Image (cartoon, helix red, strand yellow):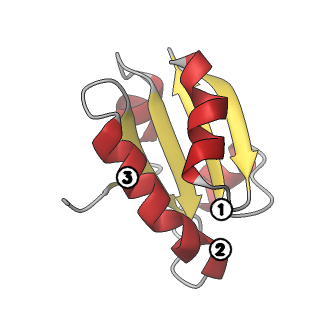
Amino acid sequence: MSEMQYVTEADFQSEVLNSSEPVLVDFTATWCQPCKMLDPVVKQLAQDWQGKVKVVKLDADQNPNIMVQYGVMGIPTLMLFKSGEIKDRITGYQTKDKLVGRLSPQL
C-alpha cells in the first residue's frame, strides 16, 4: 500500500477544492490516538475507491488556518469535498462499514 498524500495550506485549493473528482480529506495529527486507529481504515478506503475518489490527509498541527477555516474542532475529522463544496463531515473514529454507508451515496 502506497503512502497517503498529504495536503497543506499551500496546495489545499488546487488539490482539494479544484479537484475534478471527489476528495476525502482526513484531518489528523501524529499524536492523536483515534487518528492512528482510523488510519488503516482511511488507507483501505483510498485503495477501494482508487480512480473514483482522491483520499488525502491534512496534518492539523501544521495547517491551523485550514482547521479554523473549516471549523474543525476535533480530530480525526473526515470531510468529503465535491466540486469545492463540503458534502459530508464525520468526526471521531468510525468503522469502515459505517464510513462506506455514509459516504457512498455522495459519490
Tell me residue 100's x, y (percent).
56, 36
Which image quarter holds the N terminus?
bottom left
Q: Secondary structure at mark 2?
A: helix
Q: Is residue 9 above or below residue 1?
A: above
Mark 3 to mark 1: distance in Å?
16 Å
Residue lying at 71% horizontally and 38% vertically, measured from the top left: 89
Q: Is residue 14 above or below residue 58?
A: above
Per the image, the residue denoted by label 3 is 44
Residue 34, compared with residue 3, is above or below; it is: below
Residue furthest to the bottom: 31
Label 1, on which residue?
76
Q: Answer with the quarter of the image where residue 85 lies.
A: top right
Dot 1: element: loop
| Residue in the picture at 50% in, 18% down | 107
Q: CA distance from mark 2 to mark 3?
A: 16 Å
- In this orientation, which residue lies closer to the viewer: 98 or 55? 98
Q: Nearer the viewer, mark 1 or mark 2?
A: 2
Q: Quadrant for residue 79, please give it.
A: top right
Do the numbered discs 1 and 2 sit on residues whose CB atoms are within 8 Å? yes
Task: Locate residue 33: give its quadrant.
Answer: bottom right
Q: CA distance from mark 1 to mark 2?
A: 7 Å
Q: State the SS at label 3.
A: helix
Task: State yes or no: discs 3 and 1 in contact (Cβ < 8 Å).
Answer: no
User: Image check: 98 left or right of 44?
Assistant: right
Of the numbered discs 2 and 3, the one sitting upstream in the chain is 2
Foreground: disc 2 or disc 3: 3
State how many labels appear: 3
Q: Nearer the viewer, residue 44 or 7?
A: 44
